[in-house]
Amino acid sequence: MRGLGQSILEEGREKGRKEGREESIRAFIMDDLEEDIPKEHSIIKLQKYFKMTKENAEQLYGKYAMDV
């Protein structure tokens, strides 16, 4: 049983990290939009600071830019 509890705890931590990362990325994009940073520059910054591919950065940018 101890192994099951540890597994559930680890899954919860991973979910929290993932949600925190998503929220950070959303805030990052929203800030760039408010500051009128060009999309291309935001994509480059997302790749650099969040270690993601250009395709992933573009996908997330499109997702969160819709919130504006």
Image (cartoon, rainbow, N blue to C red):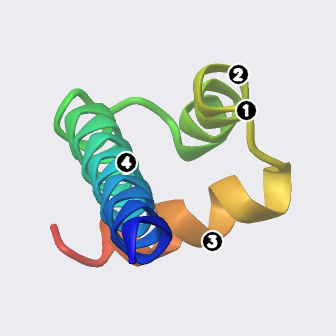
Report the mark closest to the observer, 4 or 1.
Answer: 4
Q: Position of residue 62 (x, y in %)?
A: 50, 72
Q: Position of residue 19 (x, y in %)?
A: 30, 60
Picture layout, residue 50 above or below residue 5:
above
Q: Please say if the residues under marks 1 and 2 sit with CB atoms less than 8 Å apart.
A: yes
Q: Which badge, 4 or 3, comes first in the chain's sequence?
A: 4
Q: Please say if the residues under marks 4 and 1 sit with CB atoms less than 8 Å apart.
A: no
Under tag 4, what secondary structure?
helix
Q: Quadrant of the C terminus?
A: bottom left
Give how far apart the Cα atoms at labels 4 and 3 are: 20 Å
In the picture of the structure, the residue carrying the numbered disc 2 is: 48
Under tag 2, what secondary structure?
helix
Give how far apart the Cα atoms at labels 2 and 3 are: 15 Å
Which class describes the residues within 10 Å of circle 4: few (<14), some (14-19), or many (20+)? Answer: few
Please name the residue shown 44% across and 77% down the image.
4
Q: Quadrant of the N terminus?
A: bottom left
In the picture of the structure, the residue carrying the numbered disc 4 is: 17
Give how far apart the Cα atoms at labels 4 and 1 are: 15 Å
Q: Please say if the residues under marks 3 and 1 sit with CB atoms less than 8 Å apart.
A: no
Q: Which badge, 4 or 1, comes first in the chain's sequence?
A: 4
In the picture of the structure, the residue carrying the numbered disc 1 is: 51
Which class describes the residues within 10 Å of circle 2: few (<14), some (14-19), or many (20+)? Answer: few
In the picture of the structure, the residue carrying the numbered disc 3 is: 59
Q: Which badge, 2 or 4, comes first in the chain's sequence?
A: 4
Left or right: where does residue 47 sit relative to residue 3?
right
Give how far apart the Cα atoms at labels 3 and 1 are: 14 Å
Please name the residue shown 22% across and 27% down the image.
35
Identity of the amino acid at label 1?
Lys
Residue 11 appears in which quarter of the rendering?
A: bottom left
Give how far apart the Cα atoms at labels 1 and 2 are: 6 Å
Left or right: where does residue 31 sit relative to residue 9?
left
